[in-house]
Image (cartoon, rainbow, N blue to C red):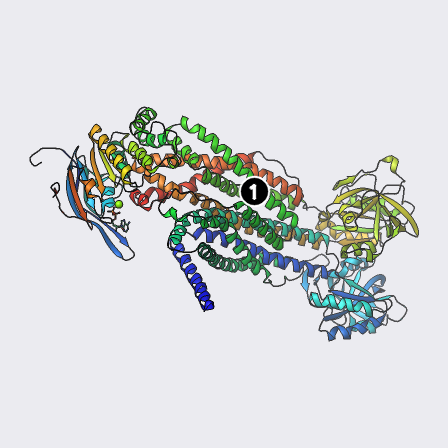
Amino acid sequence: MADRAQHRNLAFLWFTSWRMLWRDWRGGELGILAIGLVIAVTSITAVGFFTDRIERGLQLQSAELIGADLVITSSRPDVFDHIKDARAQAFSVAITQQFRSVVLGNDRPQLVEVKAVTTDYPLRGVLRVSDTPFGADEATTAIPARGDIWVEARMLQLLDLVVGDKVSLGAADFTIRKVLRYEPDRAGDMFSVAPRVLMNRADVDATDLIGTGALVNYRVLIAGAPGRIGFYRDDLAFSLRQGEQILTVEEGRPELNTALEKARQFLGLAALISVLLAGVAVATVAWRYTNRHLDTSAMLRCLGAAQRTIIQLFVLELLWLALLASTVGCVLGLLTQFVISGLLDQLLLTQLPPPSFRALLLGYATGIVMLVGFALPPLLSLRQVPPLRVLRKDVPVASVSRWFVYVAVVLCMFVLLYWQIGDLKLVSIVLGGITVTLLVLAIAAFGLIVLLNRLRGRVGVAWRFGLANIARRPASSVIQVVAFGLGIMVMLLLSTVRTDLLDEWQHSLPAKAPNHFVINVQPDQVDGITDYFRARGVEGTRLYPMVRARLVEINGKRVRTGDYESERAKHMITREFNLSWAEQMQVDNTLEAGDWWGREDFGTPLLSLESKLAKTLGLKLDDVMSFDVNGTLIDFTLSNLRRVDWDNFNINFFTVVPPGVLEDKPASWVTSVYLDDQQRQQLGELVRSWPNVTLIDVDTIMKRVRGIMERVTLAVEFVFLFTILAGLAVLYAAIQANQDERRFENAVLRTLGAKKHTLMLGLLAEFTTLGALSGLLAGLAATGLAWTLAETVFRFDYRFDPTVALSGIVSGTLIVVIAGMLGTRSVMTHPPIQTLREGAS
Amino acid sequence: MTGVESKTFVEARTLGKQVSTREGVLTLLDDINFSIAAGTSVAILGASGSGKTTLLGLLAGLDMPSSGDVMIDGRRLNDFDEDGRAQLRAELIGFVFQNFQLLFGMTALENVMLPLELAQAPHPRKTAAEILERVGLGERLGHYPNQLSGGEQQRCAIARAFATRPRCLFADEPTGNLDSETGKHIIDLLFELNSEQGTTLVMATHDAQLSRLCERRLRLDAGRLVTPEEIPADG
Ligand SMILES: Nc1ncnc2c1ncn2[C@@H]1O[C@H](COP(=O)(O)OP(=O)(O)O)[C@@H](O)[C@H]1O
Ligand SMILES: [Mg+2]
């Protein structure tokens, strides 16, 4: 029995709350609440879907560095025994076989790096080829047909060959069919001396080259679902035989990753701001909404409804609304996401994985938390509405501790946003910044309003009304100034700071950023190479020395991969370090800790370490890193940490030491230069004069990075549209916030004989003051926030711009006056008797 | 009263008001005709919902009729636009509401100053203070409406209505929200000021006893004037 009663009660709640929703909807109450929610949900899901795809895309992209998710490498062909097992587990498998050999072409021999591959190679990433050495390149999923080879441009120049020529390799003849421009898993071999020849593995036997004692590297490439690959790798660890080694996805190409990372930050920023703004809009309207429901609530109480029932009804009504609005937002978000990824899709080396539906969950969570969170505090105060309010409107309503709830809401939003954006620093700064801004705005607004109140006795009639209007309702005026201020601040951030940030970012990769690396230069060739470039109009070429070294001990303790948690740390300590030496720090580096050495330190084994690496390895100043340099153990003391921008394509080193320490060790020299198309055509000369020197062409990858920047800029602008919408929603909400009061006041004033003209002037004065106040505060806040963002997140130098505050005042006044006058039109046309009959107070 | 030549101040001519609702067109007032002489007091008597507030609203130009005309001091309200009617109100008309309708963010003094400022009267502050003194709120000038009792709020509203010395005052159930004791004081005040200033008074009420204080009574029933002309006192 009790059960049935309960069911009936539940059904009552569901139906009544649903009906209440429709009734309120018809009354036009909920429009702006819904709009705010839809904007928030749309922008968070759109960016959520997208960043999620990018995230997984990045992972795939890193996988390209080894051409697979997992590689087993060995110098013995029995590594292929693993193939059966991997195939049995339904992984994709490909094989590569690499060895050095000599190609004969034009009767000249050339040492080459041969790589023989099977059909599916590479499993991750794509090859790019072209028909002429420096012609337009295109992606391909094919591999060389039997009897064909694809070769690096360098080889064609070395041997004076063109595409279509025949060469011999071992016992077989091959036709050069394509120029190999990009090979995803070449990264590790960047320093190889010989040019690449790519061939079909089916042709290997015909060359008769294997088995004659040649050093061959056999690889099994494996790809599959991330989770299963992880398990497979763990299993493999037990079944590995001697000489076999597993390569897994480590770090991606730093330049591309940096670009995509920035893209994510920008998009995240846009989404964050939209969500927070929409939150402010929702909070502003929720306040009015509940105010209006005070009467309903009191009435329901008079009719005998329990407090609990009333709250349940309202919460359910809000939940209905949140569900509806979130659904709309999610659908829009999904659509938007397609636009964004459409803009970016072609730019990644891989196809983006399809959207995952985690973002949907987040969309709904955001919608519900936001609406219930922001509307709940005022709702809770409904519970305290005494039934007496039905009789007397001036019965005060005790307010519950709203702060507690607001703090809870902010925390919830923080968790949600962090979950979605995944950038703790960005989320903290923006959320903290906006919270602080809100507080500062509120306090400043309150102060100014108190000042205005003093003023109102001393100004003319229209201004007097305007100022009185503001001062008359301090609470809603503060809310208005804050909301206006926030809206304008965001617009300012978007119009001035956005372009600044994006410009700075694009400038970080200047048009003439180096597009070629020259490596493997021997000490006696340094002057020759420098002269070579100078003679061809390439100025300021600086060569850097580097000595290979292996990290052996840290603070006297042998380094072991097992001592490190992070994959990156494991990878970094096992790879070869390139120690360079320099008198001065490179100008594009920034000293973060310690001091750069002086002349008196030359010859002392000090070490300057890149700061991120220091963090990864947990190193601090004065730690000792011992390197094995060509058989000698040298203890270097960490004397300073540098920040390095890896994305500008300059030569940079993780480890730099003072001059006078490594000069007697075998060093090679490297440099990076920018070459235009004409200068590139002459590179053959360089290679012929210094055959041991290796040239690496990064033009393709640079173009890609630049392309990403351009498209990301577009995508960001697109997402910022939502932010603008959210800003407008806030403005609208702010105008609406005290529309009832305004309507009532105007009705009374008109009853007392005020002319439209007078009322308009009063409103004009009011909105001008509000706009100017909010604009001023917004300008200051925008400058502060932009500076903080530039300094701490995006790491640009922000140039302080005093005109932002000025344009804040001007645009604030204009926007608020126009929006205000438009928004209050109905106030002016509504017959006063009706307004007074409705009893707005 | 017949034969006495007195100037008509307020006149309704075939006045009608209809509103369209979801359920169809609703007639609130139908074919209302009467005239009120300057300086007299008239009660509009009727049950709740009979259309009293609607009628007063039309007479004061706070709303527009669907048909017919309102004449104030010989001028057709229909000939004026919203601003013209506002101007007329500022010059000629005062209004007292059942629920006071004071502005909550303004002090008693500022509320009373409002119509004076709007009419650009000289010394609004001084005049307002005087009239507040007159209604017994001399000590409460700086108080806000929510610091005043209902009766005090209505006094303040009356002060606001009389501040510009209007030729005609419309009072819509001025005691409707007050207890009978306070209501009586308010009515006394209203009539005192009315006779001091020689104002034409049009008061809507559902209270037959109250209506007897007026020189004439008009009875409204479901939007129609039941007795178009004079109801004899105690008739
Ligand atoms: N704008 C309107 N729409 C629909 N009905 C209205 C409107 N204004 C008034 N009414 C109705 O007209 C009738 C007369 O109202 P009113 O003039 O307030 O009466 P009274 O003041 O005599 O109580 C009432 O039934 C009221 O509900
Ligand atoms: Mg009424």
Q: Which quadrant is the C terminus of chain A positioned in?
A: top left
Does residue A770 appear to the left or right of A511 in the view shown?
Answer: left
Specify the amino acid type for callout 1. Leu
Q: Nearer the viewer, residue A508 or B69?
A: B69
* Number of residues whose C-alpha sits closer than 10 Å to that of mark 1, classed few (under 14), some (14–19) or many (20 or more): many
Q: Position of residue B126 (x, y in %)?
A: 33, 24
Q: Which quadrant is the N terminus of chain A positioned in?
A: bottom left
| A818 up-or-down from A549: above or below | above
Asked if residue A167 shows in the view, the reply is no
Mark 1 chain? A
Does residue A124 appear to the left or right of B51 in the view shown?
Answer: right
| Residue holding disc 1 | A493
User: Ligand 2 lies in which image quarter?
Assistant: top left
Most distant residue in the left direction: B3
| A14 up-or-down from A118: above or below | above
Q: Nearer the viewer, residue A80 or A147?
A: A80
Q: Nearer the viewer, residue B183 or A570?
A: B183
